[in-house]
Amino acid sequence: ERSLLGLKEMSRNEIESILDRAHYWESQQEKLIPVLQSRFAANMFFENSTRTRFSFEMAEKRLGAQVLNFSAAASSVEKGESIYDTVRTLESMGIDAGVIRLKPAGVLQELAEKVNVPLVNAGDGNNEHPTQALLDLYTMRKAFGELKGLSVSIIGDILHSRVARSNLWALQKFGAKVSFCAPDNMQASDLATYAPYVSMQEALQADVVMMLRVQLERHAEGMLRSADEYREQYGLTEERAASLKPGTIIMHPAPVNRNVEIDSAVVESEQSRIFPQMANGVPIRMAVMERAMKL
Ligand code: CP
């Protein structure tokens, strides 16, 4: 299988092989290893991105692939062309893989059934963000050696989070214990049977404290009454961070709302892995694009 649509249906062995291959790519001294020299990748972002878009491009270029960057705002999507017709257009031109980010959940699965080119999910509504979870698992494995038995608290806007979903599906396959913590109006009821919702105090006892961005762009009006109130109740403040176990690591997929879900000083603290997460995104996406396009 060359496509990567989500981690829910992916086996533990396959996830592990991507993590191991990322480790191989990270250990290479050479920045450019052109194993995908004759291959063409199209990065199709129908929703904004900084980290995912550029780390896919960095990964593709480090492997020597030719990269086509598609931006919906500068395309015929603005004239009403559909996502399906856009992907078919690029497929007709001969791309070997498409990296795609979409706002509405579920469209990616339909698309993958209709096209022949391998598709890589770069963020699918609030459904899955598999490469983010892969880089998160990679970051945890680096910090702790193995994932089995780790306690991971995912805190914040669970309802809108594709990152929470992909991490949940993947971490449970490895025997990690996932807990959620969220205000009532940001809980996802469909996930409650898979992981418990716990208090902030309990969530902070974990080995991994993963903070999520309050996704204002996906909120119905009035969901976030006050940023200060949110920070007080669910933010990883400097005071709360000081109460963590010394070995606990702090994660966040970013972009970060500094001083809302996490204090600015905590982003830069010793226990934070937020910038290493971004660095780890490159070897993970090298492994994923090699899998999608290798000859
Ligand atoms: N973490 C993440 O997906 O960031 P971007 O939206 O900037 O790609």
Image: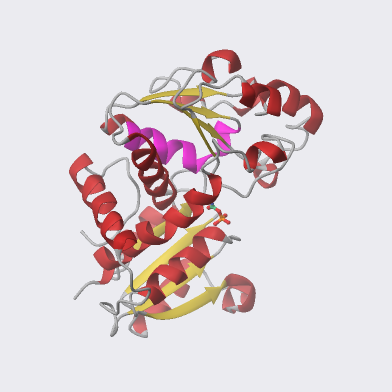
Q: Is residue 122 visible?
A: no
Q: Nearer the viewer, residue 135 or 239?
A: 239
Image quadrant where residue 170 sits: top left
Percent of width and height locating residue 198: 52, 15
Q: Is residue 95 visible?
A: yes
Quadrant position of the N terminus in the picture: bottom left
Q: Nearer the viewer, residue 60 or 166?
A: 60
What are the residue bounds of the magenta stretch? 157-171
Q: Is residue 261 left or right of residue 130?
A: right
Count all numbered tags in the image, as a single digit: 0
Q: Main secondary structure of the magenta part?
A: helix
- Residue sitting at x 30%, y 23%: 149
- Residue sitting at x 42%, y 61%: 282
Q: Is residue 8 left or right of residue 164?
A: left
Percent of width and height locating residue 126: 51, 43
Confirm whether the magenta stretch covers residue 201.
no
Percent of width and height locating residue 263: 71, 35
- Residue sitting at x 55%, y 64%: 46
